[in-house]
Image: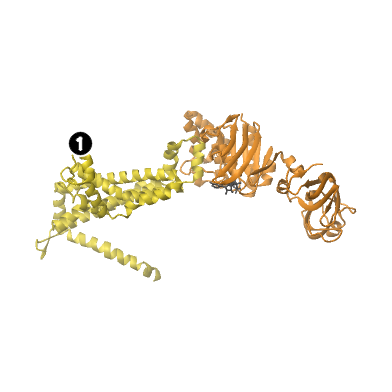
Chain colours: A yellow, B orange
Amino acid sequence: MLPLLLILPQLLVSLLFFFWPAAQAIYQSAYIPDPFGLKTQFVGWENFEFLFGDRYYLESFKTTAIFSILVTVLSMSIALWLAVMADRIIKGSGVYRTLLVWPYAVAPAVAGILWLFMFSPGIGLITWYLDQIGVDWNHSLNSGQATGLVVVASAWGRISYNFLFFLAGLQAVPRSVIEAAAIDGARYWRRFWTIVFPLLSPTTFFLLVVNVVYAFFETFGVIHMITAGGPQQATTTLVYKVYADGFVGQDLGSSAAQSVVLLLVVGLLTIIQFKFIERRVHY
Amino acid sequence: MATVSLKSLKKSYGRDEVLHGIDIDIADREFIVVVGPSGCGKSTLLRMIAGLETVTSGDVLINDENVNQHEPMDRNIAMVFQNYALYPHMTVYNNMAYSLKIAGTPKAEIKERVERAAQLLQLTEYLQRRPRQLSGGQRQRVAMGRAIVRKPAVFLFDEPLSNLDAKLRVQMRLEIRKLQRELGVTAVYVTHDQVEAMTLGDRLVVLNDGYLEQFGSPIELYQRPATLFVARFIGSPAMNIFDGMADGTQVTLDGGVRIDTGIAASGRVKVGVRPEHFVADTNGAFKVNTSMLEQLGSNTLVHGTLAGASGAGAAEIVVSLPGIHTEAMVGEGLSVAPSELHLFDPDGKRIDG
Ligand SMILES: Nc1ncnc2c1ncn2[C@@H]1O[C@H](COP(=O)(O)OP(=O)(O)OP(=O)(O)O)[C@@H](O)[C@H]1O
Ligand SMILES: [Mg+2]
């Protein structure tokens, strides 16, 4: 009885914030509400059929994939590089740590505004510099630039988090193992790729999962602030589209169906990650 | 073929000097053991030879070449760490092959050398295992294997046996000595275990608090300890030390016992006597108030205090007598041959006659 009592709060929270909304989404995905929200009409699979016939929806799959990969790779590789540098000068790492942690403390939406200011087509500082070297920057018109900016702004927010984990991981690699490799003849980068990086793989895997999930969901604030999904939906990810269609477009049936698809995609990703990748990271 | 020389080698961490000028010349194929209490700087000394610590001042020479500025990989040395430092994500085979791969050795030769080392160390059946699937003794062997496949000029060991149980330690000790002879490499071996030091080393380096106390063969250290520290450190049970007043070739111990030393000295001195150098002698100057007898069969250990002629002295004394003795027999008196006495000045330096 006591164990049940102890997990009850956790169960309630899960029910309230996960299972209940999920059930609602599944339920709603089979209906179309009338424009005034007074009546709903059962339509079966129609919402889904419509979705997969929608060019923009299919595009947003691709956008999400590109976006997740870019954000994850960019933020993780920069964080790893910084962590390696900080680890080399252990003494300075206290300073490094504080310096590199503060981007994490900035809320995504605020960070989005900062980036927006810097790159704002009319008044942005960086836009001005770019203009000086002959680059015409306008991410509200150029979809490549828009994607780039959103990716950089999102990755930026993740660097501190990834950095902390990488640094902790690096410092957990036994010093004597690295020294043994040095005596065995491996120079710095050789040691890094053959000893340190493999020993870091549990950390890397963990961050990979966390960052993909982040790129899927948490980047909402950044996208919303900088591009609002535009231009021509070039930066509309699956999650942003759920919001845009549901709250802005008031197409609740389609939005619910998208949520269900999203649920399946994330479930699938998680299974893939743990089934196939995790098997290779343990030693 | 390798000699190693340390020339007034010093090491400081910030303002703390932890090694205060060490001079050692190690001959080719010699087995040198560095011994001393915890924190005396043994590992630091070894790591400076390996190139894992920078040299603060002085020189490290390998084959008469100054290697102060050489990276560890450019010194042709191999090291066995206390915690073995195996690569956890590699198989035993790859652990041993790692250095050869880096050196660009042909695959066939790598295979041959690793397999021969594995055979030598009885690791053949474990080649495909990961370190975590091995026992402590097996891991220790892998660490040895990793060192020997490279055919280095110098072997460095930092307390390689301290994580093993007593029996395995004795066995591995013999194996290490045998391997070193067979391979004909120079070895520097760090330990804080004086028995290990005495049995392994051709010569011993005794370190104390960053100072070199004595450098010599085990027998030299036992027979002619250069300092009080060495006298106490080498030998088990430890040497008895009595305070006294020297006058010519005689010393009056603080309890009143008067002994002939045959060594000319004057003023305050310390007299050292090894427990095993006492002999039962009814005319002996030393009388013991026994507090405990330990009968070991082959010998008898007597613990007690030295009873002075005036009865005032209370110096602790440990005596080891051959064969079986009773308390009554011990009480009769003990004597020591003058040649077995060691005299030290108040600074702990040996006084020679
Ligand atoms: N990185 C370091 N920074 C500052 N002091 C150090 C450092 N490494 C070692 N020391 C100091 O140097 C002294 C010698 O250390 P060392 O590790 O050589 O001792 P040791 O003889 O190997 O002891 P043990 O038998 O416990 O291994 C110690 O007083 C230690 O505190
Ligand atoms: Mg040590």
Q: Is residue A188 left or right of residue A226?
A: right
State whether residue B299 is above or below residue B314.
above
User: SS class of the residue under badge 1?
Assistant: loop
Q: Chain of mark 1?
A: A
Query: In the rendering, at what x and y percent does residue B340 appear?
Result: 81, 45
Query: In the rendering, at what x and y percent does residue A181 appear?
Result: 49, 38
Number of marks in the image?
1
Q: Tell which residue pokes out farthest to the right in this image.
A: B283
Q: Is residue B225 left or right of residue A213?
A: right
Residue at image coords 87%, 57%: B332
Q: Is residue A105 left or right of residue B238?
A: left
Q: Is mark 1 within 8 Å of ligand 1?
A: no
Please state which of residues B13 and B6 is positioned toward the viewer in this rendering: B13
| Quarter that holds the C terminus of chain A | top left
Query: In the rendering, at what x and y percent does residue B186 appear?
Result: 62, 34
State whether residue A34 is above or below residue A97.
below
Q: Give the crowd class for mark 1: few <14, some 14-19, many >=20 residues within 10 Å.
A: few
| Quarter that holds the N terminus of chain A | bottom left
State whether residue A88 is above or below residue A104.
above
Query: In the rendering, at what x and y percent does residue A121 appear?
Result: 18, 45
Please state which of residues A230 and B69 is positioned toward the viewer in this rendering: B69
Q: Amino acid at mark 1?
A: Gly
Q: Is residue B336 visible?
A: no
Q: Which residue is mark 1?
A: A134
Hey, which quadrant is residue A85 in on the image?
top left
Q: Tell which residue pokes out farthest to the bottom in this image.
A: A1
Hey, which quadrant is residue B312 in on the image?
bottom right
Residue at image coords 81%, 59%: B313
Q: Is residue B124 visible?
A: yes
Please state which of residues A212 and A83 is positioned toward the viewer in this rendering: A83
